[in-house]
Image (cartoon, rainbow, N blue to C red):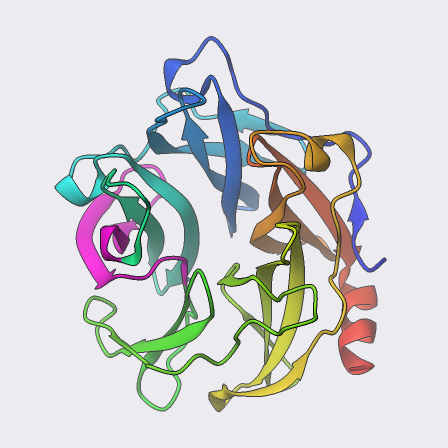
Amino acid sequence: MLFKRYENNPIIVPDTGKDYEKDATYNPCAILHENKIFLIYRAENKPKNAVSQLCLAVSEDGYNFEKYENNPIIRPTMPEEKRGCEDPRVTKIRDTFYLTYTAYDGMHPERSENIYTALATSKDLINWKKQGIIVKDIKAAAIFPEKIDGKYFMFIGGKNIKIATSTDLINWDADKSPILDIRKGYFDDKYVEAGPPPFVYNSKLVLFFNTADEQFIFHPSLALLDKNNPRKVLYRADKPLMTPTEDYEVNGKVNNVIFGSGLVEFKGTYFYYYGAADKVIAVATVSKEELEKYLNSL
């Protein structure tokens, strides 16, 4: 197994004394800032008809996190967010942090026409300015921090993964065709969703993403894309990186879920943060040397 689970998982659990997160804390994004790891996670207040809000926790070692005292940092304020702000991803471009998240307006059943991708910006990861809805009818977006051929690229999708491009980070045009779709007969035959923003290694983009099979078991996976043409998939894993085996992954609000949405390189180690069973947050690690050796073998 490439990634090793932290022996003291889960690292963040609901605080029953806090109304905004007394039921679930999961699906975090992660970023390095001021030599600390900042997690922004999804928090829910009740098991049914929950409203999601986004909260902050900070760590100096990648394992032990202190929750921000003035959580939540992002609350539902727009009509499109009536039932919550969900599943963030974060990217730093120059001196600004760009946070994409899913806005859900509460209509049922949950359909594409009432799921949106929203954007907020910040200079310090604490105080955020909402920029509004940037893409309609699709969720789960991760922005790559560098321009490619004069445009920013965003990897987006909660059924399959598409590319959207922008010149200003506000106005986005999404491709009609996905770069990664479900595959019948594989572990990803039901669902494919973008994970954390990709990073560059040897002229390739390394993209971690999430999958589910027909039994609704969620596993993380990996693909390599051409750095100069990210629509070109160079490699796609035939086996999941991890599979739910631990009690905190198998039993929760939604059983059998590992949902990876935060990835940080810190002091020679990659920390992969994931939501476990839609209930708690866990982390798995791999050394930079070992991950690069693995990528070289693909």
**Quadrant in which the C terminus is drawn:** bottom right
Q: Is residue 53 left or right of residue 288?
A: left
Which residue is at the far top?
A: 17
Count of marks, rendered view: 0
- Provide residue 117's location: percent of width, then percent of height: 29, 56
Say above or below: 158 vs 273: below
Say above or below: 128 vs 11: below
- Provide residue 45's location: percent of width, then percent of height: 40, 21
For the record, the magenta segment spans 113-141
**Quadrant in which the N terminus is drawn:** bottom right
Say above or below: 200 vs 232: above
- Which quadrant would residue 61 be assigned to in this image? top right
Q: Residue at x 34, y 37 (%)?
A: 126
Q: Is residue 59 left or right of residue 140?
A: right
- Which quadrant would residue 136 be assigned to in this image? bottom left
Say above or below: 16 vs 293: above
Which residue is at the far left?
A: 79
Whether 119 is among the magenta residues is yes
Q: Residue at x 74, y 45 (%)?
A: 244
Whether 152 is among the magenta residues is no
Q: Is residue 259 left or right of residue 138?
A: right
Q: Residue at x 26, y 54 (%)?
A: 116
- Provide residue 223's location: percent of width, then percent of height: 63, 75
- Provide residue 23's location: percent of width, then percent of height: 49, 20
User: Which residue is at the front of the view, 93 or 205?
Assistant: 205
User: Which residue is at the front of the view, 209 or 56?
Assistant: 209
Q: Is residue 297 left or right of residue 267?
A: right
Q: Residue at x 67, y 83 (%)?
A: 235
User: Which residue is at the front of the view, 53 or 146?
Assistant: 53
